[in-house]
Amino acid sequence: MQEIDLEALSTQVLWAAFGLSVLFGAIAQRTHFCTMGAVADIVNIGDWARMRMWVLAIGVAMVGFNTMVALGWIEAGKSLYAGPKVIWLSALVGGAMFGFGMVLASGCGSKTLVRIGGGNLKSLVVFVVLGVAAFATLKGITAVARVATVDTVAFVLGGGQDLPTLLAPATGIAKARLALLLGAVIGGALILWSLGRPEGRGGDNLLGGLGIGAVVAAVWWVSGVLGHVAEDPNTLQEAFVATNSQRMESLSFVAPIAYALDWLMFFSDVSKHLTIGIVAALGVVAGSAAYALATRTFRWEGFRNAEDTANHLFGAGLMGVGGVCALGCTIGQGMSGVSTLSLTSFVALAAIIGGAVAALRWQAWRIERAV
């Protein structure tokens, strides 16, 4: 058996993930890519342009992921999202909390990182509070509540919960071929819908949709192909290097922000290691900052008043708790997870959008009441 230099491989994986996340940050800063903004544009002014960009990114990531499955490079069941346990209530409750919180905090986890790169000090506060709340829900006081409540309501499937695994026995089609078919049909339909109107074919929309979707698919390759070790020489088990979950990962921005804070605070602890999630969070900030500085759009921004501060603090807390419960955010579940065609990811995505709409309606009601 060929000897594997895990340290060198980990370095390659981390640099690749960092480079791709820098690209993500720059594209998001350039195109104003934002899930919360896309939903708000529809609710407030009936503009679907940014939603078409976001859906285009989902479609591209879905086609890319399932093409790799068909080629035999990766398997959905080896990801965090497509295992046999369907935690539907956690996804529903956590997703709704995250969606409501991202409206109060002026953006989701990825948008928070992009805003930090652009000079937004409010988002820096959101970053810290989100990270603390997420870490508490991973391992602390709210983790105890999570495990004792929503996580107890679940069901277990015989195989994985991704659609190709579920439908293969009934259709008689091989799982890899079915993944290619479903990825092409569902992802292709999303792409066609996104491009079906002129506002979906603008330069920024194409750059944001195609670019972000391609980055998500590329990180799947980095983690699932480049970083895959069939037999770790230390454990003799299959391994995915430089991941927090010990599974194949793509971009997500809730738990990784918590792990980034943990790494920064305990930097001298030799047991703390960089992971794909940590370098991705740092990379998005770097990419956004590089673009903002290069185009002279970098601007310092702070809180307007006490109410603005309170909204962002509460929203950040909701995102941290909700994102961990739901196993991801608008990128983690809404893009990376959905690209695997996981049932839980679809539930989480619907709940996130529902929570965001509820928050936007609540804000509108408060404004009308104040007039």
Image: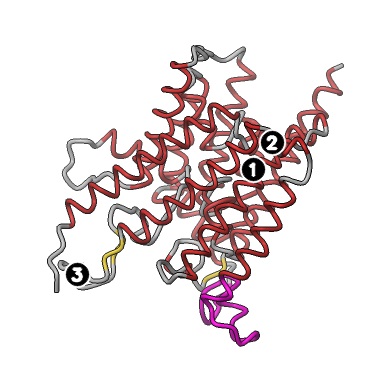
Whole-percent x, y for residue 83 in the image: 49, 70
Of 257 and 247, nearer the camera is 247
In the rendered structure, find residue 50 and report the number of the disc placed on it: 2
**Residue visible at 32% across and 39% down in the picture:** 262
Instruction: Establish if 90 lies above or below 203.
Output: below
Circle 2: is it few (<14), some (14-19), or many (20+) Cα within 10 Å? Answer: many
* Quarter assignment of residue 45: top right
* SS label for mark 1: helix
Instruction: Establish if 348 lies above or below 102.
Output: below
Indicate the amino acid at tag 1. Trp
Measured in 3D between alpha carbons, the distance from the residue under mark 3 to the one under mark 1, in whole angstroms, is 40 Å
Q: Are marks 3 and 1 in contact (CB under 8 Å)?
A: no
Q: Which residue is mark 3?
A: 235
Q: Nearer the viewer, mark 3 or mark 2?
A: 2
Whole-percent x, y for residue 122 in the image: 52, 21
**Residue visible at 69% across and 33% down in the picture:** 202
Report the quarter where the C terminus lies: top right
Indicate the amino acid at tag 3. Thr
Residue 159 on the magenta span: yes
Of 298 and 345, nearer the camera is 298
Q: Which residue is mark 1?
A: 54
Circle 3: is it few (<14), some (14-19), or many (20+) Cα within 10 Å? Answer: few
